[in-house]
Image (cartoon, rainbow, N blue to C red):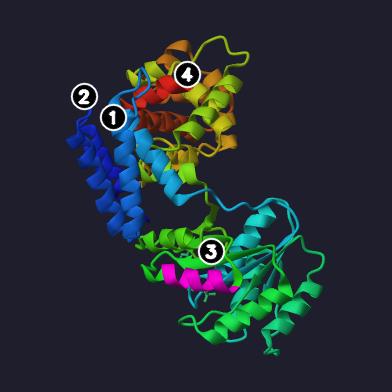
Amino acid sequence: MVLDDLGSSLRGTLDDLRGKSRLSEEDIEDIVKEIQRSLLQADVDVGLVQDLSDSIETRALEEEPPAGTTPRDWVLRIVYEELVDLVGESTELPLEEQTIMLAGLYGSGKTTTAAKMAWWFSTKGLRPAIIQTDTDRPGAYDQSKEMAERAEVDFYGDPDEDDPVKIARDGLEATENADVRIVDTAGRDGLNEELIEQIERIEQEVQPDRDLLVLDAAMGQSAKSQAADFEAAIGIDGVVITKLDGTAKGGGALAAVNETDSTIAFLGSGETVKDIERFEPSGFISRLLGMGDLKQLTERVERAMEETQEGDEEDWDPEDMLEGQFTLKDMRKQMQTMNNMGPLDQVMDMIPGLGGGLMDQLPDDAMDVTQERMRDFDVIMDSMTEEELENPRVVGQSRTRRICRGSGKPEERVRELLQQHKQMEQMLKQFQGMGDGDMERMMKQMQQ
Ligand code: GDP
């Protein structure tokens, strides 16, 4: 994905700054060079890179870190803020009745995006409809109809009509009951007058509230001129970057955003209707920098811990866990907390330094703490002795049978519980393995 290796290379450079109380001009130059290298490799426009590095350099040299902040954390903060500034805000998209028109070249992912966006709006409680006006690409109608069915949203198209403007007009009438109407348009291999003229006519008919430009993340610098042409024809309010799941770098799309003075609305990362996420600048950049979405994580953890600890006399101390004392009691509290926080894999995604790598190493069911299993685990733990809860390793065959009789749960569930405990313990060891203090700091931050 765009800037993909920025996080790791930058962290390396930043780690060299640990323990320094002041940063020299050379230190800052090293950081800026690292950022430039990553951005240029990701196809980001040279001009943009220059502006960004100038701002980072000036701020890092001139601004004083607030008391209590290390120079390293301060620089990271500046880099983060400047990158957020570079990618810009998320396109405003109120959850209300509206018509959105999609434009873009052939193969950019418009038809897929129309279905994904419709699905996304449906998850927000709105009733979406797709209007397919592409009369040029054979198969566009069938593909679009099929995807609309998969997304379980309304669809209008007319395979026998070859005037896209008429289809658009009829489509608007036919989808009167929908809240959000997404109008898909034809693309071409390249932008030409005919396409521009056609899209202008459709736009006049549809009078959309928003025009979104769909761009393939693999597009390099040509994204910029393409965006400028679409901007001149219909005016672009936001950009959707597709195919971020591939090897594409996406930097070209950033240039397009800048060129059209617009913002990013959605990111597409796969071929199914659910592979879409709303663009959220701070989370996006935090993830790229490998910082995790700390702010969001901290808020969620605080909320979850408050909920868990209500009526709970014993405090769960994350620091104890970091020191390696992880008992079944800790696990029970942690499971309650995690359950209050939301799906564990999403939580993991937000933790600094835990990219796909660690998640991939863990067995799938390590993350599978379903409600039902948790309820069973709770009942089982009620049947365990204090000693067993403190040190589950003492639970052998005969104790397992006793616990099983006491709780009325199958032996297999008891073993699952012990297995789950082991896996979580192993996971914690991996946290400790991060070794650079990030985790401790994060835990402290969570507790504040
Ligand atoms: P259109 O010509 O602009 O309407 O493009 P399509 O929606 O037909 O997409 C072109 C191809 O790209 C299709 O094979 C899609 O399945 C694929 N595609 C679209 N979006 C994504 C994405 O986010 N990730 C991946 N991997 N493929 C995508």
Where does label 1 land, which residue? 72
- Mark found first going from the N terminus, 3 or 4: 3
Asked if the beta carbon under badge 4 is closer than 8 A to the nearest atom of ligand 1, the reply is no
- Helix, strand or loop at label 1? It is helix
Going 67% across and 56% down the picture, which residue do you hit?
A: 121
- Helix, strand or loop at label 3? It is loop
Q: Could you give the CA–CA distance between mark 3 and mark 4, rounded to whole angstroms?
A: 39 Å
Where does label 3 land, which residue? 272
Residue farthest to the left, as pictured: 26
Going 42% across and 67% down the picture, which residue do you hit?
A: 224
Q: Are marks 2 and 1 in contact (CB under 8 Å)?
A: yes
- Helix, strand or loop at label 2? It is loop
- Mark found first going from the N terminus, 3 or 1: 1
- Mark found first going from the N terminus, 2 or 4: 2
Where does label 2 land, which residue? 20
| Tag 4: amino acid | Gln
User: Which of the two discs, 1 and 4, sits closer to the camera?
Assistant: 1
- Mark found first going from the N terminus, 2 or 1: 2
Whether residue 399 is visible here, answered yes or no, is no
Residue 102 place in picture, x, y as percent: 60, 69
Residue farthest to the top, as pictured: 313
- Label 1 CA crowd tier, 10 Å (few <14, some 14–19, many 20+): many
- Mark found first going from the N terminus, 1 or 4: 1
